[in-house]
Image (spheres, rainbow, N blue to C red):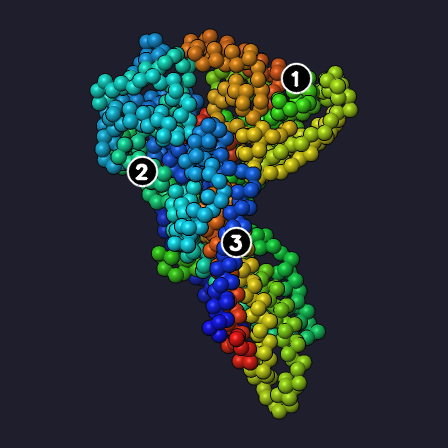
Amino acid sequence: MRRYIARRVAAFVATLFFVSALVFVVVRVLPGDPALVIIGPEGSPEAAARLREALGLNRPLLVQYTEWLARAVRGDLGVSLQYDVPVGRLIVSRLPVTGPLTVMAAVLMAATAIPLGLYAARRHRRPGDYLAMIVSQIGIAIPGFWAGLLLILLFSVHLGWVQSGGFAGWSGGLWPGVRSLLLPAIALGFFQMAVLVRATRSSVLDVLREDYVRTARAKGVSELSVLAKHTLRNALIPIVTVAGLQLGQLMAGAIVLESVFALPGLGRLALGAITARDLPVVQGVTLFVASTIVLINFAVDLLYVVLDPRIRYE
Amino acid sequence: MRHLAKLLLVSVALLLAWSPSAVLAQQNLVVQVATEPPGLDLTATPASATAAVVFYNVQEALVKVDRHGKLVPWLAEKWHTSDNKNYTFFLRHGVRFHNGREMKAADVKFVFDRAMNPETKHPAAKQYEAIRDIIVRDDYTITFALKNTNANFLLTMARQGSVIYPREAVDALKSEPIGTGPYKIGEWVRGDRIVLLKNADYYVKGLPRLDRATYRFIPDPNAALAALKAGDVDAAMFGLGPEHIPDLQKDPRFQVIIGETTNDVILSMNNSRKPFTDVRVRRAITYGINKPEVVKGAMFGFGRVLGTNVDPLNPYFVDMSGAMPYDPAKAKKLLAEAGYPNGFETVLKVAPQYYYTVRTGEVIADQLQKVGVKVKIEQIEWGQWLARVWKDADYDLTIIGHAEAWDVGNYANPKYYFRYDSPEFQKLFHESEVTVDDKARRELYVKIQKKLVEDAPVVWLYIHPRIAVTKKGLQGLWKDLPAPVFDLSEVSWVK
């Protein structure tokens, strides 16, 4: 197990190094100049040239990357060209939005998808199954931003129950914050829920056909116990794998939904930084998201051991 | 079970309906803006998103462009010049910065010395090159000695880069600027909002009328519309498109403000690239475009058709919109004369960040097709547009709005992305820069506009309208925008 963890940590570092080098090159190869974007067409090209010099963008790529890397390993991700604030601080300031949003969407996704998938498998080829599949089909077909706009129209414009966007913050207590993230979390979780329902259904269906399920039923074990103890636990490994991948998708989906709901999260930070060619921020956010996804996958791998004691990492 | 579900639904509904914002009174204003400022330092960025927050509201200049486009006294209560080369400004007494210290002539000198210092990297440093010396006469009197007569000097003093701030607060300019304005920066929650708070010590009695103004950044136009309709914002200032207007005009809850701006939307032709090097081709393109139809098709009929680069809010504006009217037959004839009897193919680069550029491009591509010019539309991202089109002039055709006022000088710069190089025009423009007499300058501006129409370096399409929608009862907003600013000083709710 120790060797396994050491291997995973080495792979983690290599992934981050690769991602950082890739983003560094891609962002700089793209046509577009941060100084020009900051100065804008109202300023003069001479002013942009002076700014480019001041930002150190005229130096060779390799020098810039090595310097950045040397600082990054010490935990210093640089300073935003746009906001003149340390990138690390910017990322931390956006986490109270994107973190809870992703978690809420994930909880909504799991809490609806797993029971619905179980139900659909249990009612295989009966109206309940078809209904669940129709719902999930709709979820897959509707893009998150569109679902977001429809939710705003219904709950904010027509019913006036929640704010149409913006983030109330956590300083006023838990509820105002949760309330401002509710609609985006639903919009974000709905699509992923649809995918997970299908994964749950097919995994549970496979297990339901196993001999030990038939044996359990023959022994007179209650249906609830058959589903919860004998079926779900054995069906969980593919479900957890899909759900783990979807967490990464949720973070990507947040980029779009944060714009629709005007939330000051990581996604909007990244989007704004790409438009403004704010390279240190693009770099910092990408690294952060990549590490989170790698860590989630790692956690999923460890979870396998808990779910199935036969799995050993040697 | 059913009762439980009902109970649950009702309690969720009740929880959702409870809102702390309902208790806020109406001396506050929440405004939607589409773009977050890239920083709040007016001496470092020329961004209009920064000006919308800071200029006029937090920081002020010696001279002001008022809502009618006139230059009026501001932090200087008057000025005097006898030779148009030495300007003496008499500062208002008792004007305090937000830190409590009184503004003095030494602050003014510091600000302009800093702007002229190349190390400051002021984006508009060129504007101050005309200044030879700045002499502080006493605490409230300061003289600017110019190298030459400069007809735009007072305008320069009224621009956003010329705001007065205390020297001790230079380091705070980027994120928490202080000035003399009617509002102070309350907080800036990056990515979400900027809050301005009333400056209770403002030197104009009775102003400002609002206690608090919040700018909320909502980039998506549909989300902006939803926020307005849901009552989450009181006004949408720079986010709604013309397609939203007909519906909102019918809604009794809102007032719609449509006004003029200085934002000229133009189709630029690369004057250094064939076939646009030939004036006949450029004229043919102009004749081949039906501008009223462009305004109808791309802007739902909002926007005034333009004939040259001088906008209607400029005192020297001459209406040239009818000078080269839509005439496809003439366009074909001119193309044939230029050696393109069957037209040609060309590429139009537009940045979808500005919605109107794509829509306008689509209408124009359709119109030019009829005279034989096949236009391929290429959408590029804003950063790329700036680098490829604006900086390197790597383009055939492009569309963008030029928001700056008094920007006809761009045509006198052969390196500007139009690549229009006319010594005759340059001479006319430079003459206008040193001519202070109003009548003589007006005549020069008439000649400038005629010369532009004749050479057709670009096609001036329309003025992008000022579109603002607010809740009923909000008063004091500017109707037209002779300067790209958002003055909140006199804004209030009808009691």
Left or right relative to B378: residue B390 = left
- Where B297 sits versus A271, above or below? above
Q: Say which residue appears at 26% left-offset and 35% top-offset.
A: B168
Chain letter for mark 3, please.
A
Structural distance between the alpha carbons of marks 3 and 2: 35 Å
Residue B45: mark:
none
Mark 1: amino acid = Val
Pointer 3 residue? A19
- Where B426 sits versus B54, above or below? above
Do the residues marked 3 and 2 share a common chain? Answer: no
Residue B21 visible: no
Q: Position of residue B248 (x, y in %)?
A: 54, 40
Structural distance between the alpha carbons of marks 3 and 1: 51 Å
Q: Position of residue B460 (x, y in %)?
A: 59, 23
Pointer 1 residue? B279
Q: Say which residue appears at 60% left-offset and 74% top-offset.
A: A118
Do the residues marked 2 and 1 share a common chain? Answer: yes
Mark 2: amino acid = Asp
Structural distance between the alpha carbons of marks 2 and 1: 50 Å
Give the class, few, some or many, for how many residues have Cα within 10 Å of label 3's Cα (few <14, many ≥20).
some
Work out whether mark 2 precedes mark 1 in sequence or the reverse, and give the earlier one: 2
Pointer 2 residue? B171
Chain letter for mark 1, please.
B
Mark 3: amino acid = Val
Q: Secondary structure at mark 2?
A: helix
Chain letter for mark 2, please.
B
Left or right relative to B386: residue B90 = left
Residue A8 visible: yes
- Where B436 sits versus B360, above or below? above
